[in-house]
Image (cartoon, coloured by chain):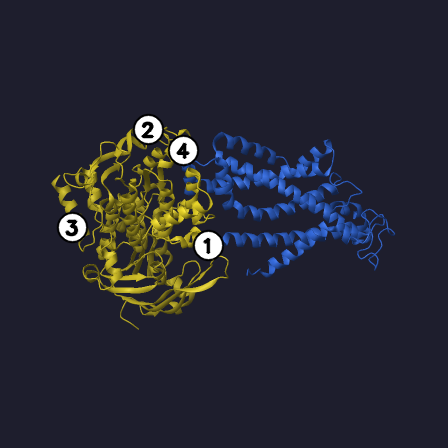
Chain colours: A blue, B yellow
Amino acid sequence: MMRIPFAAAVGLTFTALYFLAAIFAPLLAPYGMAEVVGDVWEPSSAEHWLGTDNIGRDLLTRLIYGGRTTIFIATAATVLSFTTGAILGFLAAVLGGWADQVMSRAVDLLMSIPTLIFALVVLSVMPVTVPMLILVMGLLDSTRVYRLARAVAVDINVMDFVEAARLRGEGRGWVIFREILPNALSPLVAEMGMRFIFMVLFVSTLSFLGLGVQPPSADWGGIVKENKDGIVYGIPAALLPAVAIATLAISVNLVADWVLNRTTSLKGGRG
Amino acid sequence: MSDALLDVRDLKIGATVYPPGEPPREIEIVHGVSFTLEKGKVLGLIGESGAGKSTIGLAAMGYGRGGVELTGGEVWVNGRDILKGGLKGLRKLRGAEVTYVAQSAAAAFNPAKKLMEQVTEAAIHHNRFSKSEAEARAVALFAKLGLPDPETFGNRYPHQVSGGQLQRAMTALALCPQPDLVVFDEPTTALDVTTQIDVLAAIKDAIRDTGVAALYITHDLAVVAQVSDDIMVLRNGDKVEYGPTDQIINAPQEEYTRALVSVRSIEHEEKQPTPEPVLRVSGITARYKGTDFDVLHDVSVDLHPGQTLAVVGESGSGKSTLARVITGLLPPRAGEIEFAGRTLSPALEGRAREDLRELQMIYQMADVAMNPRQTVGTIIGRPLEFYFGLKGAEKRKRVKELLDEIEMGDGFIDRYPAELSGGQKQRVCIARALAAKPRMIICDEVTSALDPLVADGILKLLLDLQKIEGVAYLFITHDLATVRAIADSIAVMYRGKVVRYGPKSQVLSPPFDDYTDLLLSSVPEMKLGWLEEVIAHRKMESAGH
């Protein structure tokens, strides 16, 4: 019934491929995750389609497992950042006054510290585990979602239908979840695609710096770090995760664009 | 070739629409309209929203607004088909031979530039006049349009003059390059009636004195009757009737034109006040947070059960603020509100659910008064669920009853607001208010965003519902014709004070205070020569004083 534009179809296909690969990694990967199966930096062959890495593990296997970790952490952190950011942002808009001031200035304070530095400081004193990574990334990123959600909600909050709900005597929960949220969804969904990709980059950066996912677990940033010395000798192993990140980023954004267009057209416009 | 200044032949205009969930589609919004306009004449284009009147007006400059395209026909100006001249030809035409006066002067002026610079810009740009000549012309036009201190008026910025003055400044802007044709697009619609009459008189004089031809676009037949020589009635992109003003007003041929002429002819018998008012507002004084002046001073009015109190005033008179105080959105600094025998808590938070239920509100803009993501069924059903705990089939049944009451039928129950027309949206808002079984509804300018015929339907519906449900209305409006149609008692507000208050028959009969007299005499009447009469009357009065 619904026609999917070409760009969105491409985006959907690749996004689905990445997520399926992440979910079924143990079934898809030809070798064990940390299994040493060949020589150092073997070129691609029939046994090792993408060659091997710096200690002789199958690179395709590492990429599939790496994608699993990266995508899982990024997804979980995005969900966390959106729930906290959106709910707090809406709450600030609905409450207004000093509550809004306190929350917004606290967020300003957090945002004034460069995210990466902040994360490095926190992670260097805390134990680096996957839940901790998700928590730190999600909470740091929720400041940005908070700003967007608050800005959108402030606009919606002054509409007559919200006033009508208030005059009816509705509680804050109804106002936030039934009146504001459905109307704030499209900018938030579009932002979600962007934020997910930033999460992928963020966790990769942390791993590259050694404060993210810990070896022997694979993740895309870690693979770059392990193989970066090969670049000098013309070994492309470190570039493959970059290609993976780039294609995922583009396809997720194609999907987000399409969702944005579709949801806004419900209101009669395409803006 | 033609002798006429403007000759529009079989004009067809198309636009691209984006229906929800479907691919974009081309539709035709003006279906072959033809007319001619001679030098020095004024043609009034009249119709409801969507009639294509603004689109046709802009086509006289070869312009199609946002996604609109001139798909067929010819537009001849001064003996040239302007649609064939290309962009270069159009650039020479616009702002020189044909100029435009927009509805909202406040949005049309650049706030960062002085008025003089903007008024003379087109004339200088097109090399029609030198800078000093253009400025001299502008000063002369300012004087002609009755603007204060014409010599120095141009040195002000747009925000330093009033809305009515800005609208006149835009007329000066349009006339400055000495054009052959001016397109007036609803130039007085956004103004208060007392301001409208001055602007209208100024525009009319300026048109007469400069001998320019004009297209005058409006939805108000009474207004266009004052300024135009001919009138063309449009509906849904088709010509309905086209003839001299006298004939259109006094002897309309078509059914639709007759309906437009006889609009606002609802008869309403005034009811006697009861001993126990449902709402008693006493001594309300209120101001907005962070300001240091009172928007309302000592306002006291009563509303009786099953009756209508109309609160009339111009923008800034405090009538909407009064509604905010009554609903509890703006707690007053002094005064008391008694509702159904109880004293209401000044702030919304302190009010009981029963108080909230019995005091409902309908808004001016039905579009934003309904959540665009909720269906009609949810919108009307929520008060039923919230106040009476109705659920499922029971709720749906009651929603259908309400839809019947507002004459819409239950086919609308699963539709979204975006799929409704303006009048239907307002009806759904009425149903939502009724669902709470209120004693009283505040109607804040509920008909002013609607076309006259649709507004008439809403007013009739409100009166019928009042008879059935016995609900009282506090009706806020700036439109005296509406007041005459529905009110039992009237409060006239001016600068935050009630200047006149009483039963309708008493308020609307002499002797008048100065403000009420000004307000009443400023409402355009559907007859030729009304404008001249009023202006002459006012001149006589001021000479007599």
Q: Are marks 2 and 1 on the same chain?
A: no
Look at discs 4 and 1 and give the one toward the viewer. Answer: 4
Q: Are marks 2 and 4 in contact (CB under 8 Å)?
A: no
Q: Are marks 2 and 4 on the same chain?
A: yes
Q: Extreme left residue here?
A: B544
Which chain is home to disc 1? A
Look at discs 3 and 4 and give the one toward the viewer. Answer: 4
Look at discs 2 and 3 and give the one toward the viewer. Answer: 2
Q: Position of residue B83 (x, y in %)?
A: 39, 68
Q: Position of residue B318 (x, y in %)?
A: 31, 36
- Direction from residue B470 to residue A101 in the image, left or right: right
Q: Which residue is mark 2?
A: B342
Checking the image for residue A268, the label placed there is 1
Q: CA distance from mark 2 to mark 3?
A: 50 Å
Q: Are marks 3 and 4 in contact (CB under 8 Å)?
A: no
Q: Which residue is mark 4?
A: B353
Q: CA distance from mark 3 to mark 1?
A: 47 Å
Which chain is home to disc 3? B
Relative to A141, residue A17 above or below: below
Q: Tag 4: Cα neighbours inside 10 Å, few (<14), some, or many (≥20)?
A: some
Q: Is any atom of residue B478 visible in this view? A: no
Which of marks 4 and 2 precedes in the sequence?
Answer: 2
The image quadrant of residue A86 is top right
Q: Are marks 3 and 1 in contact (CB under 8 Å)?
A: no
Q: CA distance from mark 2 to mark 1?
A: 44 Å
- Direction from residue B73 to residue A226 in the image, left or right: right
- Direction from residue A144 to residue B61 in the image, left or right: left
Q: Tag 3: Cα neighbours inside 10 Å, few (<14), some, or many (≥20)?
A: few
Closest to the observer: B438 or A205?
B438
Q: Which residue is mark 3?
A: B533
